[in-house]
Image: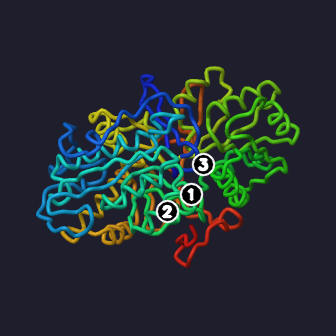
Amino acid sequence: MGETSRNAPAWAAGRTGRPRRGVVALVGLVAVLALVAGACGSGRDDADDDAGGGGGTSTTAAADGTETFGDLPSPCGPGDASGATAQGVTDTSITIGYGDDAGFQSSPGLNHEMADAIKAMIEWCNEQGGINGRTIEGKYYDAKILDVNNAMTEACGEVFMLVGEGWSLDSSQEGTRLACGLAAVPGYSVSPQFANGKDMIQPVPNPIDYTPTAVAAAFQKKFPEEIKKTAVMYANYAATQDTKDKVLASYPQFGFEFLDCPQEYNISGESDWKPFAQRLKDCGAEVVYYTGSPYPNFQNMLDAANQVDFDPIWITDANFYDPKFADWNVNGLADKVYVREAYTMLEEAAEGSGTAKYIEIVEASGGDISQLGQQAASAFLLWATAARECGSDLTSQCVLDEIRKITEWTGGGMHAPTNPGSNKPPECGLVLKLEGTKYVQWYPETQGEYDCDPSYVTQVTGPVVDKVQLDANRIATAQ
C-alpha cells in the first residue's frame, strides 16, 4: 500500500510459481503506490460478493485450543451479542463494506487482492462464529478508480463500516463519506484528505504530515558519502509529487544532500528516457530517489541509464516489491535498486507466522495474495479485534475508540509494529534489494528483523502539508 504504506492498489499479474503479488497504482506510498500493467479481470457480481460463512479454510490453534492468526489471538468466535445498534448491525449479523478498483477498464483486476483478502477473512471469521456470535456479511464495491464517489454513495446507505478497502482516488469520496458519517478502517489511504480524515484509522498509517524514514537511516549507515550527491525523479502526478516532497523535507536530517537537478517525467511514459539519465549523470548523482511505477517506466529508465553508462544507487518505495519487475532483471540492471518496506517478505513466510496464515487463508478461499492483500487483512483483524470488545453495544464510535486503545499492532506479525490510533507511520522498517531475479533483505541483515527508532518517524512541513488544513488533532478540515 502505505505503508503503504504503504503503505496502496495492485495490478493483476499471472502466477509465476511464486506468491502472486500486486503493486500499488496511481499513488506514491507505504504504505505502496504505482502504475503497473494488468492482465486479469475481476469476475465479480453481487451474488459472489456477499461473503458469508464457510470457506473450508484450515485453522491454526494456540496451545489452549483457541484459534490464532500468527501471534494474534483470533478476535472471532461465538457469543450472545444482540441488538440493532447501527446501520448494518442486527441481532445476528454485521454488514461491512469493502472494495477495490478491479473494474478499471485500462487495467482489469486492479488491486483485486484486497477484496480477495477481505472475502477470505470473512469466511475464516464466520467459521469460528463471527464476532460475538454475529455473522459477518460483506458488500463489495468496485470503484473502478473514477467511480469512487458512486461506490461511496452506495456504501453510505448499506453498511456498518468500511473495512480493508483500497480506492486510488479516495479524495473524491471524502465529501460523501463525511456527510453520511461512514467510518473506515481501510487497507491504505492515498490523498491527504483521507489519510488525515475524520473517523478513519489505518493499521499502518500513512498521514500527510509525518513520513517513515528508516530507509534514509539505513543509507546513512551504509552509503554515508554517496547520499551527499542525491537526486530525485518523480512523475507529473500529485501523489508522486507529494511523496517526493516528503523525501526532500525529511531525508536531509539523515545526511542526504540533494542536487539541483530534479527530474520530472510523464506518468504515461516518455518517448526517450536517455536525456533524463544523461542529466542525472551530468549532475553527478550517485543516489537517485525514484517514485513511480516499476514497469514499464522505470525499466525504460534503467535501459536508458545503461546506454549512457549511468549506474547510480536507486531508492524506491514498496510498490517495487513485485515479481514481474524481479523477473525482468535477468540482465542485472536493477541490482542496485533498494526498496523500503514495513512488511516481511511473502517468500520468507515462517511456519506459524501471520504472513503464512494470510497466505493459507486466502489461497484456501481461491484468492490471490499480495502485500496489498496483507494490508487489507491487517485492517480486518484490527477492526474485528475492536468490534469484539464492543459486545452488544456495537457502534462505529465504539470501534474507533477501541482501536485507539491499541498502542502496538503488527497484524499478527505481518508487518512492523504500529500505533494505529496515533496516525503516525511505524518507527521500524527494513530494506529489500534485488539480486538478479530475487529479492533479498538487505537491511537489517537478519531476515525478518526490523530497524527501529523513534527518530524514523519524521514530521513534514511545507507545501505537501499546506494543501490541506489540519486541526489541532491533525484531522483534515478542508476537502
Residue 183 lies left or right of residue 52; in this view the side is: right
In the picture of the structure, the residue carrying the numbered disc 1 is 191
Residue 179 is situated, as x and y percent measured from the top left of the image, at: 44, 69
Residue 209 is situated, as x and y percent measured from the top left of the image, at: 60, 65
Question: Label 3 to label 1, Cα distance in Å?
Answer: 10 Å
In the picture of the structure, the residue carrying the numbered disc 2 is 174
Q: Could you say which is closer to the camera, residue 143 or residue 331? A: 143
Circles 2 and 1 in contact, beta carbons < 8 Å: yes
In the picture of the structure, the residue carrying the numbered disc 3 is 28
| Residue 375 appears anywhere in the view | yes
Mark 2 or mark 1: name the one nearer the start of the chain. 2
Taking the spot 62% from the left edge, 66% from the top edge, the residue there is 459
Question: Label 2 to label 3, Cα distance in Å?
Answer: 19 Å
Q: Amino acid at mark 1?
A: Ser
Residue 47 is situated, as x and y percent measured from the top left of the image, at: 26, 40
Q: Could you say which is closer to the camera, residue 329 or residue 304? A: 304
Between tags 3 and 1, which lies in front? Answer: 1
Residue 432 lies left or right of residue 462; in this view the side is: left
- Indicate the secondary structure of the residue bearing disc 1: loop
Residue 396, above or below 229: below
Q: Amino acid at mark 2?
A: Glu
